[in-house]
Image: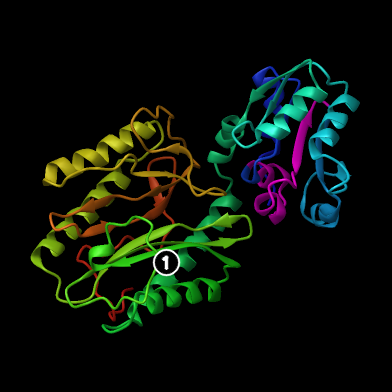
Amino acid sequence: MIPNKEALLALPARLGLRAVVMMSPENFAYASGSNVITVRLIRPRHGYVMITPAGAELIVCSIEKTLVEAESWIDAITVYTEFVDKPVAVLAARLKAQGIDSGRVGIDLDYLNKVAFDDLRALLPNVEWVNTTEDVAAIRAVKTADEVAMLKMATCATHRAVLDAMAGSTLGDTEAQMARRIMDGMLEGGADGVLFLCFASGDRTDQPHAHATDRVPGPGELIRFDVGATWGAWASDFARTYSTGEPTQLQRDTYRKLSEIQQETIEFIKPGVTAESIFETCKAGYEKRGLRFHMPHIGHSFGLELHESPMLRPGEKTVITEGMVLNIEPIVIDEKRGTYHLEDLVEVTSDGTRLLTLGLAPREIPTIGTKIG
Protein backbone atom coordinates (compact mmCIF):
# COMPACT_ATOMS: atom_id res chain seq x y z
CA MET A 1 0.00 0.00 0.00
CA ILE A 2 1.50 3.35 -1.05
CA PRO A 3 2.01 5.82 1.84
CA ASN A 4 1.71 9.61 1.81
CA LYS A 5 4.97 9.97 -0.10
CA GLU A 6 4.79 13.73 -0.37
CA ALA A 7 4.56 14.21 3.39
CA LEU A 8 7.39 11.75 4.04
CA LEU A 9 9.73 13.32 1.48
CA ALA A 10 9.01 16.79 2.87
CA LEU A 11 9.62 15.75 6.48
CA PRO A 12 13.37 16.59 6.76
CA ALA A 13 12.91 20.10 5.43
CA ARG A 14 9.80 20.68 7.53
CA LEU A 15 11.63 19.68 10.71
CA GLY A 16 14.91 21.38 9.82
CA LEU A 17 16.80 18.07 9.58
CA ARG A 18 19.36 16.79 7.10
CA ALA A 19 17.68 13.38 6.96
CA VAL A 20 14.98 11.29 8.63
CA VAL A 21 15.33 7.54 9.23
CA MET A 22 12.23 5.40 9.88
CA MET A 23 12.92 2.03 11.46
CA SER A 24 10.28 1.08 14.05
CA PRO A 25 8.20 -1.82 12.68
CA GLU A 26 5.17 0.43 12.16
CA ASN A 27 7.02 3.42 10.71
CA PHE A 28 9.11 1.17 8.47
CA ALA A 29 6.03 -0.70 7.17
CA TYR A 30 4.25 2.58 6.50
CA ALA A 31 7.14 4.42 4.84
CA SER A 32 8.33 1.47 2.77
CA GLY A 33 4.90 0.21 1.78
CA SER A 34 6.23 -3.30 2.38
CA ASN A 35 5.23 -5.83 5.04
CA VAL A 36 8.61 -7.24 6.12
CA ILE A 37 7.56 -9.37 9.08
CA THR A 38 11.11 -9.93 10.34
CA VAL A 39 11.51 -6.21 11.08
CA ARG A 40 8.71 -6.72 13.62
CA LEU A 41 9.51 -10.22 14.82
CA ILE A 42 13.35 -10.26 14.91
CA ARG A 43 14.51 -7.06 16.60
CA PRO A 44 18.21 -7.17 15.52
CA ARG A 45 17.18 -7.47 11.86
CA HIS A 46 16.63 -3.77 11.27
CA GLY A 47 15.02 -2.25 8.23
CA TYR A 48 15.46 1.47 7.48
CA VAL A 49 13.72 3.95 5.23
CA MET A 50 16.13 6.85 4.82
CA ILE A 51 14.76 10.17 3.54
CA THR A 52 17.43 12.65 2.37
CA PRO A 53 17.51 15.52 -0.14
CA ALA A 54 18.38 12.85 -2.74
CA GLY A 55 15.09 11.05 -2.07
CA ALA A 56 14.13 7.79 -0.38
CA GLU A 57 16.35 4.75 0.14
CA LEU A 58 15.68 1.35 1.71
CA ILE A 59 18.19 -0.60 3.79
CA VAL A 60 17.18 -4.19 4.56
CA CYS A 61 18.63 -7.59 5.33
CA SER A 62 19.69 -9.33 2.11
CA ILE A 63 17.12 -12.12 2.50
CA GLU A 64 14.33 -9.49 2.29
CA LYS A 65 15.53 -7.88 -0.94
CA THR A 66 13.16 -9.68 -3.29
CA LEU A 67 10.17 -8.89 -1.08
CA VAL A 68 10.80 -5.14 -0.92
CA GLU A 69 11.57 -5.07 -4.63
CA ALA A 70 8.12 -6.52 -5.23
CA GLU A 71 6.18 -4.42 -2.69
CA SER A 72 7.89 -1.09 -2.06
CA TRP A 73 7.57 2.14 -3.99
CA ILE A 74 11.25 2.85 -3.25
CA ASP A 75 13.69 1.80 -5.99
CA ALA A 76 16.98 2.57 -4.21
CA ILE A 77 17.72 -0.50 -2.07
CA THR A 78 20.85 -1.31 -0.07
CA VAL A 79 21.22 -4.69 1.63
CA TYR A 80 23.33 -5.98 4.49
CA THR A 81 24.32 -9.54 5.33
CA GLU A 82 23.05 -10.84 8.64
CA PHE A 83 25.77 -11.77 11.18
CA VAL A 84 28.38 -10.19 8.89
CA ASP A 85 27.29 -6.54 8.79
CA LYS A 86 25.97 -4.42 11.61
CA PRO A 87 22.76 -2.81 10.30
CA VAL A 88 23.58 0.55 11.93
CA ALA A 89 27.04 0.49 10.30
CA VAL A 90 25.41 0.14 6.88
CA LEU A 91 23.01 2.96 7.76
CA ALA A 92 25.92 5.19 8.80
CA ALA A 93 27.77 4.38 5.58
CA ARG A 94 24.75 5.26 3.45
CA LEU A 95 24.29 8.58 5.27
CA LYS A 96 27.96 9.38 4.74
CA ALA A 97 27.57 8.51 1.05
CA GLN A 98 24.94 11.27 0.90
CA GLY A 99 27.37 13.68 2.54
CA ILE A 100 25.50 13.52 5.85
CA ASP A 101 28.11 13.08 8.59
CA SER A 102 27.14 16.05 10.76
CA GLY A 103 24.12 18.17 11.63
CA ARG A 104 20.71 17.06 12.87
CA VAL A 105 19.23 13.72 11.73
CA GLY A 106 15.91 12.24 12.81
CA ILE A 107 15.41 8.59 13.78
CA ASP A 108 12.93 6.48 15.79
CA LEU A 109 14.53 6.82 19.22
CA ASP A 110 11.36 5.42 20.80
CA TYR A 111 12.35 2.09 19.24
CA LEU A 112 16.12 2.02 18.64
CA ASN A 113 17.83 0.12 21.45
CA LYS A 114 20.72 1.61 23.43
CA VAL A 115 23.40 -0.75 22.12
CA ALA A 116 22.59 0.06 18.49
CA PHE A 117 22.25 3.77 19.29
CA ASP A 118 25.66 3.85 20.99
CA ASP A 119 27.17 2.20 17.90
CA LEU A 120 25.47 4.72 15.64
CA ARG A 121 26.74 7.67 17.67
CA ALA A 122 30.28 6.26 17.57
CA LEU A 123 30.10 5.87 13.80
CA LEU A 124 28.69 9.40 13.27
CA PRO A 125 30.01 11.40 16.24
CA ASN A 126 29.19 14.79 14.71
CA VAL A 127 25.52 14.00 14.10
CA GLU A 128 22.88 15.27 16.53
CA TRP A 129 20.18 12.59 16.66
CA VAL A 130 16.59 13.79 17.00
CA ASN A 131 13.61 11.62 17.94
CA THR A 132 11.16 11.74 15.03
CA THR A 133 9.03 8.72 15.98
CA GLU A 134 5.92 10.81 16.65
CA ASP A 135 6.47 13.08 13.64
CA VAL A 136 6.11 10.06 11.36
CA ALA A 137 3.23 8.75 13.47
CA ALA A 138 1.43 12.07 12.94
CA ILE A 139 1.58 11.51 9.17
CA ARG A 140 0.28 7.96 9.66
CA ALA A 141 -2.62 9.25 11.77
CA VAL A 142 -4.39 10.73 8.73
CA LYS A 143 -5.35 7.77 6.56
CA THR A 144 -5.64 7.60 2.80
CA ALA A 145 -8.83 6.28 1.21
CA ASP A 146 -7.09 2.95 0.53
CA GLU A 147 -6.00 2.68 4.17
CA VAL A 148 -9.52 3.39 5.41
CA ALA A 149 -10.88 0.75 3.04
CA MET A 150 -8.38 -1.79 4.38
CA LEU A 151 -9.30 -1.03 8.00
CA LYS A 152 -13.02 -1.18 7.25
CA MET A 153 -12.63 -4.58 5.59
CA ALA A 154 -10.62 -5.91 8.53
CA THR A 155 -12.93 -4.60 11.23
CA CYS A 156 -16.09 -5.77 9.46
CA ALA A 157 -14.63 -9.24 9.03
CA THR A 158 -13.76 -9.30 12.73
CA HIS A 159 -17.24 -8.09 13.69
CA ARG A 160 -18.84 -10.75 11.49
CA ALA A 161 -16.67 -13.44 13.09
CA VAL A 162 -17.85 -12.32 16.54
CA LEU A 163 -21.53 -12.26 15.56
CA ASP A 164 -21.36 -15.73 14.04
CA ALA A 165 -19.30 -17.21 16.88
CA MET A 166 -21.55 -15.92 19.65
CA ALA A 167 -24.73 -16.86 17.79
CA GLY A 168 -23.30 -20.37 17.51
CA SER A 169 -22.43 -20.61 21.22
CA THR A 170 -24.65 -22.02 23.93
CA LEU A 171 -24.72 -22.40 27.69
CA GLY A 172 -22.39 -25.28 28.49
CA ASP A 173 -19.64 -24.20 26.07
CA THR A 174 -16.28 -23.30 27.56
CA GLU A 175 -14.61 -19.90 27.16
CA ALA A 176 -12.00 -21.57 24.98
CA GLN A 177 -14.60 -23.05 22.64
CA MET A 178 -16.27 -19.68 22.14
CA ALA A 179 -12.92 -17.91 21.65
CA ARG A 180 -11.82 -20.53 19.13
CA ARG A 181 -14.97 -19.90 17.08
CA ILE A 182 -14.05 -16.20 16.92
CA MET A 183 -10.48 -17.03 15.86
CA ASP A 184 -11.66 -19.43 13.19
CA GLY A 185 -14.14 -16.85 11.91
CA MET A 186 -11.50 -14.14 11.60
CA LEU A 187 -9.21 -16.46 9.64
CA GLU A 188 -12.08 -17.60 7.42
CA GLY A 189 -12.84 -13.90 6.88
CA GLY A 190 -9.43 -13.36 5.31
CA ALA A 191 -7.12 -12.61 8.25
CA ASP A 192 -3.61 -14.06 8.02
CA GLY A 193 -3.15 -14.27 11.78
CA VAL A 194 -4.69 -13.60 15.19
CA LEU A 195 -3.13 -10.56 16.86
CA PHE A 196 -4.75 -11.02 20.27
CA LEU A 197 -7.85 -12.51 21.86
CA CYS A 198 -8.78 -11.51 25.41
CA PHE A 199 -11.78 -13.45 26.67
CA ALA A 200 -13.31 -13.76 30.14
CA SER A 201 -16.57 -14.64 31.85
CA GLY A 202 -18.16 -14.32 35.28
CA ASP A 203 -15.84 -13.09 38.00
CA ARG A 204 -12.94 -13.00 35.51
CA THR A 205 -14.40 -10.14 33.43
CA ASP A 206 -12.54 -7.53 35.51
CA GLN A 207 -9.23 -8.94 34.19
CA PRO A 208 -8.58 -6.60 31.23
CA HIS A 209 -6.47 -9.00 29.20
CA ALA A 210 -7.54 -12.45 30.40
CA HIS A 211 -6.99 -15.49 28.21
CA ALA A 212 -9.80 -17.91 27.46
CA THR A 213 -9.81 -20.97 29.70
CA ASP A 214 -11.76 -24.20 30.04
CA ARG A 215 -14.15 -22.42 32.43
CA VAL A 216 -17.82 -22.98 31.59
CA PRO A 217 -19.79 -19.74 32.04
CA GLY A 218 -22.85 -20.17 34.23
CA PRO A 219 -26.41 -18.82 33.88
CA GLY A 220 -26.82 -15.07 34.30
CA GLU A 221 -23.12 -14.29 33.79
CA LEU A 222 -21.33 -11.72 31.65
CA ILE A 223 -18.92 -12.60 28.84
CA ARG A 224 -16.48 -9.88 27.80
CA PHE A 225 -13.91 -10.04 25.01
CA ASP A 226 -11.50 -7.82 23.05
CA VAL A 227 -10.16 -9.31 19.82
CA GLY A 228 -7.98 -8.46 16.85
CA ALA A 229 -6.49 -10.14 13.79
CA THR A 230 -3.91 -9.19 11.16
CA TRP A 231 -4.22 -8.50 7.45
CA GLY A 232 -0.60 -8.09 6.42
CA ALA A 233 0.76 -5.07 8.28
CA TRP A 234 -2.77 -3.94 9.16
CA ALA A 235 -5.02 -5.15 11.96
CA SER A 236 -8.41 -5.05 13.65
CA ASP A 237 -9.42 -4.26 17.24
CA PHE A 238 -12.97 -4.91 18.43
CA ALA A 239 -14.73 -5.51 21.77
CA ARG A 240 -18.17 -6.65 22.91
CA THR A 241 -20.02 -7.81 26.03
CA TYR A 242 -22.61 -10.62 26.05
CA SER A 243 -24.88 -12.32 28.56
CA THR A 244 -25.17 -16.07 28.98
CA GLY A 245 -28.92 -15.55 29.36
CA GLU A 246 -31.40 -14.07 31.83
CA PRO A 247 -29.31 -10.98 32.67
CA THR A 248 -30.02 -9.25 35.96
CA GLN A 249 -31.54 -5.78 36.08
CA LEU A 250 -28.15 -4.42 37.13
CA GLN A 251 -26.53 -5.97 34.08
CA ARG A 252 -29.26 -4.70 31.76
CA ASP A 253 -29.10 -1.15 33.11
CA THR A 254 -25.31 -0.93 33.21
CA TYR A 255 -24.91 -2.28 29.69
CA ARG A 256 -27.59 0.04 28.30
CA LYS A 257 -25.95 3.08 29.89
CA LEU A 258 -22.55 2.09 28.48
CA SER A 259 -23.95 1.73 24.97
CA GLU A 260 -25.56 5.17 25.26
CA ILE A 261 -22.24 6.67 26.39
CA GLN A 262 -20.39 5.15 23.47
CA GLN A 263 -22.91 6.49 20.97
CA GLU A 264 -22.86 9.97 22.54
CA THR A 265 -19.07 10.01 22.43
CA ILE A 266 -18.99 9.02 18.77
CA GLU A 267 -21.61 11.67 17.91
CA PHE A 268 -19.42 14.33 19.54
CA ILE A 269 -16.43 13.62 17.28
CA LYS A 270 -15.79 15.93 14.34
CA PRO A 271 -12.86 17.83 12.85
CA GLY A 272 -11.64 20.60 15.15
CA VAL A 273 -12.31 18.99 18.52
CA THR A 274 -9.32 17.83 20.57
CA ALA A 275 -8.50 14.29 21.64
CA GLU A 276 -8.81 15.44 25.24
CA SER A 277 -12.31 16.83 24.70
CA ILE A 278 -13.48 13.44 23.39
CA PHE A 279 -12.22 11.89 26.63
CA GLU A 280 -14.01 14.54 28.72
CA THR A 281 -17.26 14.03 26.79
CA CYS A 282 -17.15 10.31 27.48
CA LYS A 283 -16.31 10.86 31.15
CA ALA A 284 -19.24 13.28 31.51
CA GLY A 285 -21.55 10.56 30.16
CA TYR A 286 -20.57 8.30 33.05
CA GLU A 287 -21.12 11.05 35.61
CA LYS A 288 -24.54 11.90 34.13
CA ARG A 289 -25.65 8.29 34.52
CA GLY A 290 -24.13 7.66 37.93
CA LEU A 291 -21.51 5.19 36.69
CA ARG A 292 -18.03 5.02 38.19
CA PHE A 293 -15.38 6.22 35.74
CA HIS A 294 -11.90 4.68 36.03
CA MET A 295 -10.33 4.79 32.56
CA PRO A 296 -6.97 6.45 31.74
CA HIS A 297 -8.11 6.73 28.10
CA ILE A 298 -11.35 5.99 26.26
CA GLY A 299 -9.92 5.17 22.84
CA HIS A 300 -7.08 5.69 20.41
CA SER A 301 -6.06 6.17 16.84
CA PHE A 302 -5.65 2.89 15.00
CA GLY A 303 -3.99 1.45 11.92
CA LEU A 304 -0.60 -0.26 11.77
CA GLU A 305 -0.22 -0.13 15.53
CA LEU A 306 -2.67 -1.23 18.21
CA HIS A 307 -2.45 2.11 20.04
CA GLU A 308 -1.50 4.91 17.67
CA SER A 309 -1.34 8.62 18.40
CA PRO A 310 -3.42 10.44 19.32
CA MET A 311 -4.64 8.66 22.43
CA LEU A 312 -8.01 9.92 23.66
CA ARG A 313 -6.84 10.88 27.14
CA PRO A 314 -6.46 13.83 29.50
CA GLY A 315 -3.81 16.31 28.38
CA GLU A 316 -3.79 15.19 24.73
CA LYS A 317 -4.25 18.45 22.81
CA THR A 318 -4.05 16.97 19.31
CA VAL A 319 -6.77 18.43 17.09
CA ILE A 320 -8.89 15.78 15.38
CA THR A 321 -8.83 16.08 11.59
CA GLU A 322 -10.67 14.52 8.68
CA GLY A 323 -9.16 11.17 7.71
CA MET A 324 -8.24 10.04 11.21
CA VAL A 325 -9.47 6.62 12.27
CA LEU A 326 -10.33 6.16 15.96
CA ASN A 327 -11.35 3.27 18.20
CA ILE A 328 -13.91 4.33 20.82
CA GLU A 329 -13.90 1.84 23.71
CA PRO A 330 -15.67 2.75 26.97
CA ILE A 331 -15.45 0.22 29.82
CA VAL A 332 -17.41 0.13 33.07
CA ILE A 333 -17.28 -2.03 36.20
CA ASP A 334 -20.57 -2.48 38.07
CA GLU A 335 -21.00 -2.71 41.84
CA LYS A 336 -20.58 -6.50 41.73
CA ARG A 337 -17.30 -6.28 39.73
CA GLY A 338 -18.95 -7.30 36.49
CA THR A 339 -17.07 -5.59 33.65
CA TYR A 340 -18.56 -4.38 30.35
CA HIS A 341 -16.60 -3.31 27.26
CA LEU A 342 -17.65 -2.00 23.84
CA GLU A 343 -15.28 -0.98 21.05
CA ASP A 344 -15.99 0.30 17.55
CA LEU A 345 -13.87 1.90 14.83
CA VAL A 346 -14.87 5.20 13.21
CA GLU A 347 -13.46 7.34 10.42
CA VAL A 348 -13.49 11.10 10.97
CA THR A 349 -15.29 12.78 8.06
CA SER A 350 -15.74 16.44 7.12
CA ASP A 351 -18.75 16.84 9.40
CA GLY A 352 -18.62 13.95 11.88
CA THR A 353 -17.81 10.26 11.70
CA ARG A 354 -18.50 7.16 9.64
CA LEU A 355 -18.80 3.84 11.44
CA LEU A 356 -16.35 1.23 10.11
CA THR A 357 -17.81 -1.76 11.97
CA LEU A 358 -21.05 -3.47 10.93
CA GLY A 359 -22.98 -1.39 13.45
CA LEU A 360 -22.89 -0.35 17.06
CA ALA A 361 -23.71 -2.93 19.71
CA PRO A 362 -27.44 -3.42 20.36
CA ARG A 363 -28.84 -1.18 23.07
CA GLU A 364 -29.98 -4.22 25.09
CA ILE A 365 -27.31 -6.67 26.21
CA PRO A 366 -27.12 -9.53 23.67
CA THR A 367 -27.30 -13.19 24.66
CA ILE A 368 -25.18 -16.03 23.34
CA GLY A 369 -27.03 -18.29 20.93
CA THR A 370 -28.99 -15.33 19.53
CA LYS A 371 -28.47 -14.09 15.97
CA ILE A 372 -27.82 -10.32 15.66
CA GLY A 373 -27.95 -8.48 12.37
Q: Quadrant of residue 30?
A: top right
Residue 216 left/right relative to 19: left
> Is 275 in the magenta?
no
Q: Position of residue 112 (x, y in %)?
A: 66, 35
Q: What residue sits 79% from the left and 15% below the top?
A: 126
Task: Report if residue 93 is visible in the image.
Answer: yes
Task: Report if residue 164 is visible in the image.
Answer: no
Q: Position of residue 193 (x, y in %)?
A: 58, 66
Q: Of 168 and 206, which appears nearest the observer?
A: 206
- Which range is magenta? 27-53
> Is 47 in the magenta?
yes
Question: According to the image, label 1 marks what residue?
Answer: 159
Q: Position of residue 10 (x, y in %)?
A: 70, 27
Q: Of 191 and 219, which appears nearest the observer?
A: 219
Q: Amino acid at mark 1?
A: His
Quarter of the figure that contains the C terminus = bottom left
Residue 27 left/right relative to 222: right
Q: Of 207 and 354, which appears nearest the observer?
A: 207
Q: Position of residue 284 (x, y in %)?
A: 20, 38
Q: What residue sits 33% from the left and 44% below the top?
A: 298
Q: What residue sits 66% from the left and 32% below the top?
A: 114
Q: How many marks?
A: 1
